Image: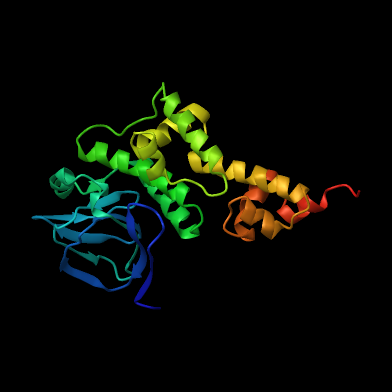
Amino acid sequence: MESTRITAWKPEVPGIGEVLHASHRDHAYPMHSHDAWTLLLVDRGNVVYDLGRSRHATERGVLTVLPPDVSHDGRGTTETGYRKRVLYLERGTLDERLIGRAVDMPALQDARLFERMDALHAALARRSDPLEAESRLALILGRIRARLSGGSAPVASAAPNVRLAEGLRELLDSRIETGVSLHEAAELLKTSSDRLVRSFVGSFGVAPHSYLTGRRVELARRHLLDGRPAAEAAALAGFYDQSHLTRHFKRLIGVPPATFARARPAS
């Protein structure tokens, strides 16, 4: 058994500097600090660490938030080691006024937050749709800000901002092939990314990335019915490649694109 296994990459998602998935059997981190906010999930085993002047321990199902410029270490507590997933956020992603609060309470016990982090890591591991990862990250950051500010986590509003939701839908409809980043959309609509996502979901019952994927599948269907091959239809509809189209097409339509194309009646 290897003592350490690591996968690390930089996704094309604004706000995320690095994704790290690692398993350590006996490695112990010395005292160090990062020029970034660190979001840590420990999936197996347990890690104890010193942060500030206090000792802490990770728990399964809990998100650990380590602030920039504050020294910490880390070591496993069992012979079998531990497995972790980490996001290193770009420095300005969270307000530096929250650093002191994060030092005092780095462990956020929040089942919904953990679920969203787990889903974000899954989206990043697929390395498919930046808008999905952006949308998930926006909701996570909004929840972290609320928790570290001492308030309750934001909940979906009973009266979402329909104007914002419709504005984002118009943007997505106008850029089906090329897409639009959540950051750009929020700037154009003069709002925050997490508010924009919550308004869209509250108004239309679907996340922005899911809506865009559905529109792209519709466009790909039209290209397939026009007789274009699946690879060309995928490119014209804004998918990365044919396999990207196939995954979403089969999930939404029930059959792969090639099967759908062959279903056309003979002329």
In the image, what residue occupies the spot 41% across and 40% down? 185
Image location of residue 249, percent across then percent down: 66, 49
Q: Residue at x 17, y 62 (%)?
A: 33
Lateral position of residue 124 relative to residue 99, left or right: right
Q: Please provide percent x and percent y for residue 78.
A: 28, 67
Seen as rendered, the residue at the extreme right is: 267
Q: Could you tell whether 255 is left or right of 105 in the image?
A: right
**Which of 257/233 is in front?**
233
Which residue is at the front of the view, 191 or 174? 174
Q: Is residue 249 visible?
A: yes
The residue depicted at 30 percent of the width and 34 percent of the height is 153
User: Which residue of the protein is positioned furthest toward the top in this rendering?
Assistant: 159
Q: Residue at x 34, y 34 (%)?
A: 191
Percent across and percent down for residue 177 are 57, 48
Scheme by which the image is coloured: rainbow
Counting from the top left corner in percent of width and height, residue 2 is at: 38, 78
User: How many labels were placed on the picture?
Assistant: 0
* Residue 115 visible somewhere in the drawing: no
User: In this image, 94 relative to 181: left or right?
Assistant: left
Viewport quadrant of the N terminus:
bottom left
Relative to residue 112, is residue 238 depicted above or below? below
